[in-house]
Amino acid sequence: MGKYQENCVEMLLREDNPRRPGRAGTYIFGQEFKGQDYFEPTPILTEIMPITGNYMMMSGFPEEVQKRIYTMRDGHKGGPYPKYNMNADKLMIFSGSDPDNMKDLGAHIEFHLGEGEDLEIFHFDEPRAIFVPKGVRHGPIYITQFRRMLTMFCVFTQPSKEAADIVQAWDYVGNDAKIKEVIGDDMDEYKKFFAENPK
């Protein structure tokens, strides 16, 4: 066996069943859940998400939808809430797919970083990278005006979600108007974004 033979790594493919509207699964380099095999020498966890339509992340539940907490495959609790990475910085990169216009992201992004007086809301439709310092709340993220596939990359400065110490903002209430910008007026569409108990 060569010295670097194991350095070409097959990434974990996390697929939602049923598939969420606007997202084609997630490739993961690093440890997503406890007990998952991964390339242990890595100092980072990376998620690669192809975005295929209007989409939202960490948006909370609308007022008219009962709030839920999901149990993931390794037993930890999660949900569509804004997050704090208490032990990891995070870089989020948004990149388009038009070779003839590299500045066209293919959609409009609204990204919330911080909270209270420190809240910044970024709006962009060109490729961007957002640095999320450890301990800073981030989310929701709304992807609207979709025209062409884009890719979102998330890089944590820890090799696993457990080491990143991710804390959920359980008390966050979703903004119905913003959610409707993503899914339209039929709030039943919202339920398609979150399986009964996603793994």
Image (cartoon, helix red, strand yellow):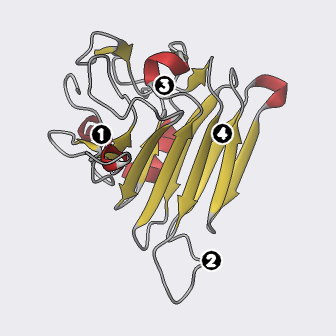
Tell me which residue sits at (31%, 47%) in the image. 9
Q: Position of residue 45 (x, y in %)?
A: 47, 35
| Gap in angstroms between the C-alphas marked 2 and 4 | 22 Å
Q: How many marks?
A: 4
Q: Distance from label 3 to label 1 (Cα)?
A: 13 Å
Q: Quadrant of the C terminus?
A: top left
The amino acid sitting under disc 3 is: Tyr
Along the line of sight, which residue is nearer the eye, 84 or 39? 39
Q: Amino acid at mark 1?
A: Phe
Q: Please name the residue that numbered disc 1 is placed on.
A: 193
Question: What's the mark number on residue 179?
Answer: none
Residue named by callout 4: 112
Check disc 2 and report its element: helix, strand or loop: loop
Secondary structure of residue under mark 3: loop
Q: Is 132 located above or below residue 1 in the figure? A: above
* Residue neighbourhood size for the residue with mark 2, other residues' Cα within 10 Å, grouped as few (<14), some (14–19), many (≥20): some
Measuring from the top left, give residue 50's x and y in whole percent. 37, 57
Residue extending farthest left:
17
Helix, strand or loop at label 4? It is strand
Give the foreground label among 3 and 2: 2
Tell me where residue 16 appears, x and y as whole percent: 21, 39
Pointer 3: what residue?
81
Quadrant containing the N terminus in the rendered view: top left
In whole angstroms, how far apart are the C-alphas of marks 2 and 1? Answer: 28 Å
